Image: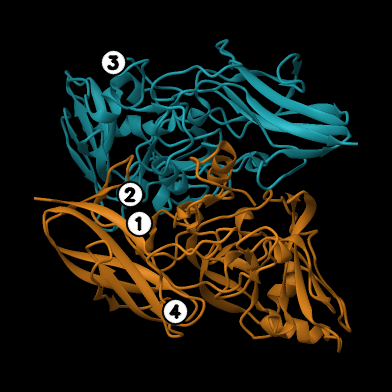
Chain colours: A cyan, B orange
Amino acid sequence: MAVTDEGISTEELQLAQRNSGMPLEALRWPLTPLGLHYLLIHYDIPQVDADAWRLEVGGRVERPMTLSLDDLKARERVDVAVTMECAGNGRAALEPRPVSQPWLNGAVGTAKWTGTPLEPLLREAGLAADALEVLFTGLDRGVEGGEPQAYERSLTLSEALDGEAILAWAINDTPLPPQHGFPLRLVVPGWYGMTNVKWLARITVLDAPFEGYQQMHGYRMRRSEDELGEPVTRMVPRALMLPPGVPDFMTRKRFVPAGPNRLEGRAWSGLGPITRVEVSADGGASWEDAELGEAPGPHAWRGWSFAWEAAPGEHELCCRATDAAGNAQPLEPPWNLGGYSNNAVQRIPVEVEA
Amino acid sequence: MAVTDEGISTEELQLAQRNSGMPLEALRWPLTPLGLHYLLIHYDIPQVDADAWRLEVGGRVERPMTLSLDDLKARERVDVAVTMECAGNGRAALEPRPVSQPWLNGAVGTAKWTGTPLEPLLREAGLAADALEVLFTGLDRGVEGGEPQAYERSLTLSEALDGEAILAWAINDTPLPPQHGFPLRLVVPGWYGMTNVKWLARITVLDAPFEGYQQMHGYRMRRSEDELGEPVTRMVPRALMLPPGVPDFMTRKRFVPAGPNRLEGRAWSGLGPITRVEVSADGGASWEDAELGEAPGPHAWRGWSFAWEAAPGEHELCCRATDAAGNAQPLEPPWNLGGYSNNAVQRIPVEVEA
């Protein structure tokens, strides 16, 4: 993976055009309206004939299964609100910049997913005594790092069986649209987006660790190409603020009226519930606690708000989250070669009008 | 408006992250699935309370009107399939590059819009004898070119009364989502996207030409800042190809199997029906006619296909459209200060595997 100090290249721009961030004003909705949730699509969105489509469950299982969408919908059904974030969110703020999808901070969204739990399905298939990992293979194909591949990622057996992962066929009470993985995708609450394999075709129980590209090369925390690094897994905490006032079209700088303003936003972590959000109106020099609000579910972002008395002049607003495990956001971006997990605090320049 | 030879800046990237292009594989659908249609939002997506919302019709009319969403839905109802493209589509391919939303070529989509025709509503309000233009004002507010403003654009009286414009409350049989202008937007078939004012709050009949920012400064064909220029109006012709084969994640280069391939795409023009699409497999040196297919309506893109016998090696695929008015796409980008209407032919590098 290359790094650069230069402006965004045409190749990065091609990715930025086809992958879409959530406009930050969409933080006002506890569930992100359809079409505003972030999208990161490695290859092409495949076209799938739902009638012909089947999910194959095989590998190290006692009873391989072939399931239609109706078969899946006849199983136990759950709804779960999940905040999902791309592991590369914040990548474009790193210096030098890792060359890939150039996210600033909008690669997030929260949806209500409807599906069936993964664990009972795996139990029903019967795990062999030597079962070690569960591999999820999508229908999307492409070339990455020089290797032709279908998009696929694994979970360890304990991660797959912890009762939280679901196989989802609906988002916000609507059948999955093509870009969210029609007809079926994996949803693993708390994990970064790459885990949630879309256009799911096959679940394969393995007796050895999966060594495919997206597990052993992509999505690892490395400082250099010759390092294996630790895998990227759960979302580290982040708070975002709904940009106050109105924007300048080009710079996105905000213009805010003087006087009392209610700053609002949402915060999440895959490592524990959010226990604290702080706000700074002076670029991080001083911080005050925000008031914590509701979350649309235990795996979704939590609202926060803060009463700010805006004095005329230029200000830099910041917010930062802390979770129950004690993780807090850093002021400066933590660098790694893939540009993953950059949860440095958001900074919003505002001009308060006299 | 600035121009530059440098890589995309952080400001441009902020726009690219919040505005989203249509991934080109979505060309396979005659109506673009919700969430894949392009989005260009100048300021912020406003939150609108549909119960409290009213459309005001005033200015140089005999009978000013205040209409609820239910009032509008009780009027004549039409469905129309419309291909909509941002006037800035192709901007990022210009050299030097106009600094604004850096579109490559994905700023397009086709939707089925449901609404009520504009003309009978204006007739019912009663146009004053000195009526000259009709101004459409949205609820979205921001600063552009140093001017605080609501987004607003006008049509001449004849354009507003030609029978084609509608006031739409649904897209693809779904109530407008926030990002498409909930609860009501203007849709003017054949015109570039900036015409189709979202979050519509007010229709004002004017007795003089509207001189607001988006009419007199933005969306004009100019070579320099001191020139007024001609207004940007209807879409010039463009054909796009569904990228064949599979992509490389980073470069988006395509890998295609050798032998017979069916190339497919869609073509549109706001200046007349599409009468011809040509394909080149050698970077524009030679061209052959594609087969024209169906359109989902008279204001929507027309499908095309082309049988290509792919020989191993490197190729550059191109396509170009011609409309009934005789307009054809240029091989080289036509430059202007705002980066509007760049309909230079699409070029897709492909590697055919042996």
Question: Chain letter of disc 3?
Answer: A
Instruction: Decide which of A2, B254 is in the foreground and name it.
Output: A2
Q: Residue furthest bottom?
A: B129
Element assignment for label 2: loop
Element assignment for label 3: loop
Query: Could one spot residue A350 in this view of the protein?
Result: yes
Picture coordinates of residue A147 (x, y %)? 20, 35
Is disc 3 on the same chain as disc 4?
A: no
Question: Closer to us: mark 2 or mark 4?
Answer: 4
Query: Could one spot residue A303 in this view of the protein?
Result: no
- Residue drawn at x 67%, y 50% is B45
Q: Residues within 10 Å of mark 2 (few under 14, many from 20)?
A: many
**Label 1 near label 2: C-beta < 8 Å?**
yes
- Residue drawn at x 35%, y 46% is A184
Q: Mark 4 or mark 1: which comes first in sequence?
A: 1
Disc 4 residue type (three-letter): Asn
Picture coordinates of residue A177 (x, y %)? 43, 53
Disc 3 residue type (three-letter): Leu
Residue B25: mark: 1
From the image, tell me which residue sits under label 3. Answer: A228
From the image, tell me which residue sits under label 2. Answer: A44
Disc 1 residue type (three-letter): Glu
* CA distance separating discs 4 and 3: 56 Å
From the image, tell me which residue sits under label 4. Answer: B327
* CA distance separating discs 2 and 4: 32 Å
Left or right of residue A113: residue B18: right
* CA distance separating discs 3 and 2: 28 Å
* CA distance separating discs 1 and 3: 34 Å
